[in-house]
Amino acid sequence: MKQARSGFTLLELLVVISIISVLMALILPAVQSARNSARRIDCKNRIRQVGMATLAAAARNKDRFPAYGRFRSTESHLTCGKVMEEPNERIVLNEGGIAGTNWVVNILPDLDAVAIYERWDFTMDMANTSNVQMATKIIPAMICPDDETAERSKISYVINCGYGEMKLLKTYQQKVSQGIIPLVEDIHIPTMIEFDWNGNSRRPGFPNPCEKPCPCWDDGEDTLVTRDTGIAWASLDGDEYSLPFKEVYDGLENTLLIAESFNAGQTGMWSSPSVGDCGFVYPVAYPTAIGVNFPFPPPPPEFRGTPNSTGIATEGIPIPGSMHQRVVHFVTASGSVVSISDEIDPGVYARLVTPRGSFPHNQPWLVDQPITLMPH
């Protein structure tokens, strides 16, 4: 009798390996897709938590949305007319010391970070850095699980800071990175953004002729319209510029509040009050910011302005972006989570950013129709 053969032949082994390889090729994409879907769902849950925490903070603040950052001004060595009268004579310091105080600090109690909030020193000066140790800790709710930059930036979700003039934002960022203390005129705030909506050749934040010994820097109409292009603005010397709920005239459901951004967190602290660290804007070239273009003024040539329109190596540029495939998650001012395609029409997107994209201040030179956003 022949002895029974044990083991496999080489041919049989190759056949089995081929079958396993085919099965793996079929299964792995499905597994990867399931993992990606799970991370997107996790991101939606986290950004929803951030949105609800922001609304809770606003409710505590008499229904006014939190400031994106808090600053205080002080006089510099320059003089012109009355001391501290002009914005190019005053330097600005972050409230809360070098770490700064922004909208994220306001919502810490609602993000399961009460311990950090209770230890935060809101009166800290620039020489004290103990807040920095807390501001560099990971807060899970503030991190998108797909954001590969979050380990460095510490923040994935940013707040709506309205229409922005990119040159102004860049100037502020550069001064801070070079150790130069910015001036009031460098702040992203409605009174300093050079948008001439009413076309009268006067711009806020720009030296205009007037009867004073020094130039005038304001234009009331332009300031009001610019303020109505966003939800969260800077608080300067205790003056609050952010909008209350009742002034979101396009409807809370039709106005974006929180966005994903892997471009955020250049300083590596979630507490920085710089727009490039904690906010997002719709970029506008200020010479084109006039009434006939509202609410869709063209962006600067180098910016498309819509979500995912900047690359990954652009931290500090406040444009929403995500690492999900072709979509970016947002939270509306009502608390709904929506997924917006990066191929959205720029005009529609611009209207979603502004809380008052139709008939602001009843000015005849600012006329448009509101749009409706359907949440997922």
Image (tube, helix red, strand yellow):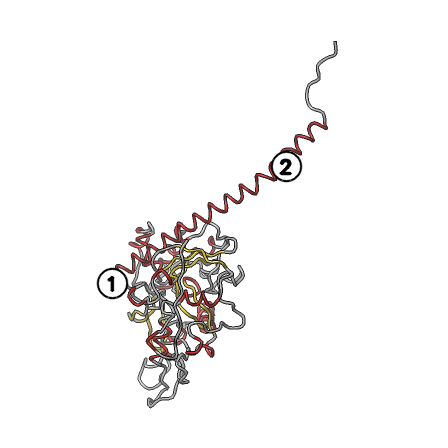
Q: Position of residue 96 (x, y in %)?
A: 33, 63
Q: In which quarter of the image is residue 335?
A: bottom left
Q: What residue type is labelled 2?
A: Val
Near mark 1 (Cα within 10 A), the count class, few <14, some 14-19 or many ≥20, is: few
Q: In which quarter of the image is residue 366?
A: bottom left
Residue 271 visible in the shown view: yes
**From the viewer's perspective, is 237 left or right of 325?**
left
Residue 48, above or below 186: above
- The residue beneath circle 2 is 22
Residue 243, above or below 138: below
Near mark 2 (Cα within 10 A), the count class, few <14, some 14-19 or many ≥20, is: few
Q: Secondary structure beneath disc 2?
A: helix
Give residue 62's mark: 1
Q: In which quarter of the image is residue 311?
A: bottom right
**From the viewer's perspective, is 115 left or right of 9?**
left
State the residue in front, 178 or 258.
258
Q: Position of residue 306 (x, y in %)?
A: 49, 64
Residue 274 visible in the shown view: no
The residue at 39%/75% (across/down) is 367
Q: Position of residue 241 (x, y in %)?
A: 32, 70
Q: Are marks 1 and 2 in contact (CB under 8 Å)?
A: no
Distance from the alpha carbon under mark 1 to that under mark 2: 61 Å
State the residue in front, 178 or 331.
331
Q: What residue type is labelled 1?
A: Lys
Give residue 223's mark: none
Quadrant in which the N terminus appears: top right
Q: Which of marks 1 and 2 is nearer the N terminus?
A: 2
Residue 251, above or below 206: above
The residue at 31%/52% (across/down) is 110
Q: Secondary structure beneath disc 1?
A: loop
Q: How many labels does the image show?
A: 2
Q: Where is residue 11 in the image (x, y as percent from the top left)?
A: 72, 28
